[in-house]
Image: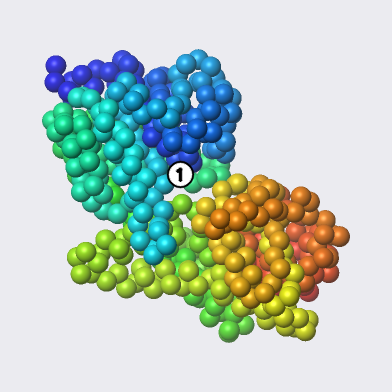
Amino acid sequence: MNIKEVLVEKIRAKTLTMGVCGLGYVGLPLAVDKARHGFRTIGFDVQQKKVDMVNAGENYIGDVVDTDLKELVSSGMLRATSDFSFVKDVDFIAICVPTPLDDHQQPDIGYVRDSAKAIARYLRRGSIVVLESTTYPGTTEELLRPILEEGSGLKCAEDFYLGFSPERVDPGNLIYKTSNTPKVVGAVGQDAAEVISMVYSAILDSEVHTVSSPAVAEMEKILENTYRNVNIGLVNELAMLCHKMGINIWEVIDAAKTKPYGFQAFYPGPGLGGHCIPLDPYYLSWKAREYGFHTSMIESSMMINDRMPEYTVERAGKILNRDRKALNGAKVLLLGVAYKQDIDDYRESPALRVMEEFQKNGSETDYFDPFIASCRYKGQWYEGLRALTPEALREYDLVVVTTAHSCVDYEMVSQAGVPVFDCKNVMRTVANRESIEML
């Protein structure tokens, strides 16, 4: 049998051994789903702490069910290692490593490159490699393919299959998880596309949509998040204009979304956070420059969204001025440092940028987040308040709501006698609004 026939038979018989490189917010849920659907799975990570926790059945990702992880590990269906020589034992490996921006706001694909080099050393004939990390169009074929071919001595599409299938992870989403979110697959060659799509169909409870190439799949992922970035930029700009005009932007959006077609509601806030939306437009604009193309609309939205933490602090300063107080020396409490509500993920959180802007202006800042006891930003650790009480609130000159956690007692916050700047409209149902100003 040829490579395709062997792999198809292994998928059908569930004898295909799965691998996942990177056991973070994307990789661990994917590894659990692979094992849960009857495929023996090995997780690879350079962080020994994560490896040890997985092997002990200790979960550290909110979207993974604790009992699922324990059962899969104890049954031998899932294990983790930092030893990449075990790549030789897997038939399929998904690369799910971070793709951040560097200090110059340019793509940092070092984790992808290092992972590819580590995998290439042990890649064997008849294997499948799929990149899931969000990146610029062309990464799979221009970066990954040469590294894998040179490091292994194998030829792509003949000796091994290569593809791109963008992760679609929304931490805290109560409806859509890794298992039931539709998947997009693009691969080098028709056989690879068919086999990779078949793998995902076997491990996910969702539709798999196959496209003509990895570049199409890479651009599709960029489009998803750039679409959101542009629309959030639009509504953030309108929020600034509405404030000048004395119009409630939140009421405007509520009215607009009554239209059953042609409108999707997006909301303003103190900035953008998370592992994709703030980063992906930079990947696209960086790649576009290679073709002499200027992504003017996208870059405009990026500029607006990047300015929101600074704008938030400017507005906060005006609130303090009403009480004859200055930003310099003011004590400010941020409610929430997670990048979105009801999760413990603070990657690229705008709240941290807001905190930094306050500190630049001489303010003393603390935070309370029921999900995050401590956080690290630019090499420094910050400890959150252990409890949010009226007495604790009265120690501050201003409270700024930066994350819309649903478990915070906002009624109590409003009654503490401290001005509140609500950047998330989370206090919209509070009756006494004398101390509350909305973004």
Q: Position of residue 260 (x, y in %)?
A: 46, 60
> Residue 322 lies in what quarter of the image?
bottom right
Please tell me how crowded label 1 is: few (under 14), some (14-19), or many (20+) other residues with Cα within 10 Å. some
- For the residue marked with disc 1, what is the amino acid? Val
Using the image, determine if residue 151 lies above or below residue 376: above
Using the image, determine if residue 106 lies above or below residue 126: below
Identify the residue at image location x=46%, y=73%: 304
Name the residue beneath numbered marker 1.
169
Question: Is residue 45 toward the left or the right of residue 398 in the image?
Answer: left
Question: Is residue 314 toward the left or the right of residue 86 in the image?
Answer: right
Q: Position of residue 1 (x, y in %)?
A: 14, 16
How has the structure been colored for display? rainbow
Of 201 and 16, nearer the camera is 16
> Residue 254 lies in what quarter of the image?
bottom right
In the rendered image, which quarter contains the C terminus?
A: bottom right
Identify the residue at image location x=58%, y=84%: 244
Identify the residue at image location x=50%, y=20%: 72
Q: Secondary structure at mark 1?
A: loop
